[in-house]
Image (cartoon, coloured by chain):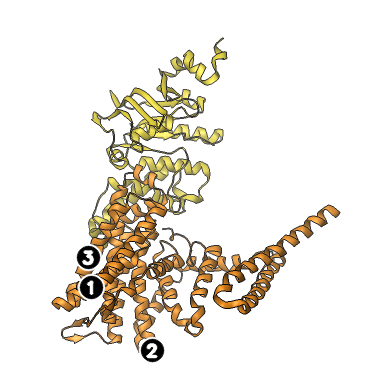
Chain colours: A orange, B yellow
Amino acid sequence: MSGTGSIISRVRHNQFSKTFFISLWVSLLLLPFAGPRIAVIFFGVVFFFVLLVRLIKKTASAEPVSIISSRIRSMSGSIYSGRYSGFMLLIAAVASAAAPFALTSYYLDILIMACIYMLLALGLNVIVGYTGLLHLGFAGSYAIGAYTYALLNTHFGINFWLCLPVSALASSAAGLLLAIPALRLRGDYLAIVTLGFGEIIRIVLNNWDSVTKGPNGISGIAAPSIAGISLGNLHLYYYVVLAIILIALFVIKRVEVSRTGRAWMAIREDEIAASSMGINITRYKIYAFVFGSLWAGVAGQLFAAKMQFVSPESFTFMESVFILCMVILGGLGNTYGVLFGAFIIAIMPEALRGIDSYRMLIVGIGLVALMIFRPQGITGGARRCR
Amino acid sequence: MQIIEARGLSRHFGGIKAVEDVSFRIARGSIASIIGPNGAGKTTLFNCLTGLTRPTKGSVVFRDADITGMQPHEICSRGISRTFQNIRLFRSMTVLENVMVPQHSKVEYSSLQSIFSTKEFNNKEKAIRERGYEMLEFAGLQDFAKKPAQSLAYGSQRRLEIARALASGPRLLLLDEPTAGMNPSETEEVMTIIKRIQSLGITIMLIEHDMKLVMGVSDFIVVLDHGVKIAEGRPDEVRKDPLVIEAYLGREALH
């Protein structure tokens, strides 16, 4: 009896010291940023919180976290199974169509940016989510789309609609150029090359003064117009972006359910098996890069036309990371989940504006928590099963 | 009439001769087994035949064409398909999708057709799906079509791998230890599946350690040891071969 008793007390002691060290670690991390006072407070808060969670875990038979996540999973499952899908779709359609009437132009502006990020996330999802190739330089593709329109429009006066396919193609071509060397690499090495790609694009834009005007950026980019009516007004421009997102969603969905989509996923699951089953993995990896980058080009042009100004600082490495976070948060390979993730992350900086200086900290903690409790993303699973 | 022939096939990894100067011919429509102790080079031999590794020397002739050094997907579309020793399913895809993927090189259409959902696209997708179901029925997995592949039981995963290999429409099927880790009744099931595949006119090459199965189904056996072919022939010939007995049981067993 005494033996069991001492084991229990040792376990309890372990729990306690573990909690202590976790909180200590967190507060030490915080120390250089927030100073000693906040670090001590933070230590107390984290210690208390972790202890509380552990106590709840012990008293309740099931972990609270897993209850929540399983509830979310069953909820998302029922959305996918079609039980609520018609209803949800209707709500989404009405909400997105009515948004400009309900929102002030400040919020509408944020919403348009969120839509542009959704498009980027959809594109990156093809590369990272479907095909499983880690791309850390997606902002480079985005920049190419933006600058293609900026340059063609300001120098040659080519209008928005005519330039849209050109931007998309320019971005795809860059994706092709990136894919050719990147194909020889896997995993971490691929990530580094794609990161380099993003940086190269940004640095070229920053230094090629004669063409891109360097860090000053290019201004005076025209907004789109139809039959002489300018769509530069936020309300109208919102519908342009919305329409393009719907087209993107439709096209990407169609490709996903075709042999191309299956080939991508087979490569993600197991490259060796995929190639033994007759899939030309080189070709389909290139295809994923080209097809994914295409949407980044479109998003870039939408961004340039909205801001009517582009400069290299909009296309930093952080931008690539943010887009990647959207894809991961939403759930790799899950198209609708990715839209959701993009929306959340895009509006988060605005939602957290009140606590400005802690914004990145909260985003970081959120991502760490996500990776611990729900590595497959909010909407769960690589993708729904058909 | 042979379907595949290896001519002096070698595969070296640095100083290690995983496969050294192996030649054989496999008759069309037969079941041939590759046996040998662990590390004899059986899987490396399969990898050479399917293009996953490039042979250091020698060549592979399949249906009168030299396929040495071709890419795995080219070899697959020429009619060689395989399973893997350690199961390599597309784990998070559904069971049905697993048998739809290999039809990739058989049924083709452009992405534009899929975007606009043309009649041709729909017909071809329907054909792919139907053939997929056929394959699942063959392996007795039709009830699990919509389940993710990773949710299947171990024995079913092995059978799904065979169904997936069949879905690419092969003339030659390479099975790498299809009964590894199976109980006797599951092994029995696989044996019947192998027999049924043969009756479809598909040639089979088999890596297997279960001697009862090997002796029961094989028409021809190739024995490898340390990368070298030490014997070949009908099961009853191979069983009596002193070199084979030595490789399996040690030199003492002969005396």
Label 1 residue SS: helix
Residue B50 vertical position relative to residue A52 in the rendered view, above or below: above
Alpha-carbon neighbours of circle 2 within 10 Å: few (<14), some, or many (≥20)? few
Question: Which quarter of the figure is the C terminus of chain A placed in?
Answer: bottom left
Q: Amino acid at mark 1?
A: Asp
Distance from disc 2 to disc 1, alpha carbons, whole Å, reads 42 Å
- Which of pointers 2 and 1 indicates the residue nearer the eye? 1
Q: Position of residue B89 (x, y in %)?
A: 44, 46
Q: Position of residue A108 (x, y in %)?
A: 36, 85
- Any mark on residue A170, and which? 3
* Chain letter belonging to callout 3: A
Q: Is residue A158 visible?
A: no
Give the mark nearer the N terminus: 1 vs 3: 3
Residue A112 vertical position relative to residue B221 in the rendered view, above or below: below
Q: In front: A285, or B56? A: B56
Q: Amino acid at mark 3?
A: Ala
Q: Is residue A225 visible?
A: yes
Q: Are marks 1 and 3 on the same chain?
A: yes
Q: In front: B133, or A60? A: A60
Residue A127 vertical position relative to residue A354 in the rendered view, above or below: above
Give the mark nearer the N terminus: 2 vs 3: 2
Distance from disc 1 to disc 3, alpha carbons, whole Å, reads 20 Å
Q: In front: B168, or A343? A: A343
* Chain letter belonging to callout 1: A
Label 2 residue SS: helix
Total marks in image: 3
**Which residue bears the numbered disc 2?**
A102
**Which residue bears the numbered disc 1?**
A209
Distance from disc 2 to disc 3, alpha carbons, whole Å, reads 37 Å
- Point 22% across, 65% down: residue: A170
Q: Residue furthest right?
A: A2
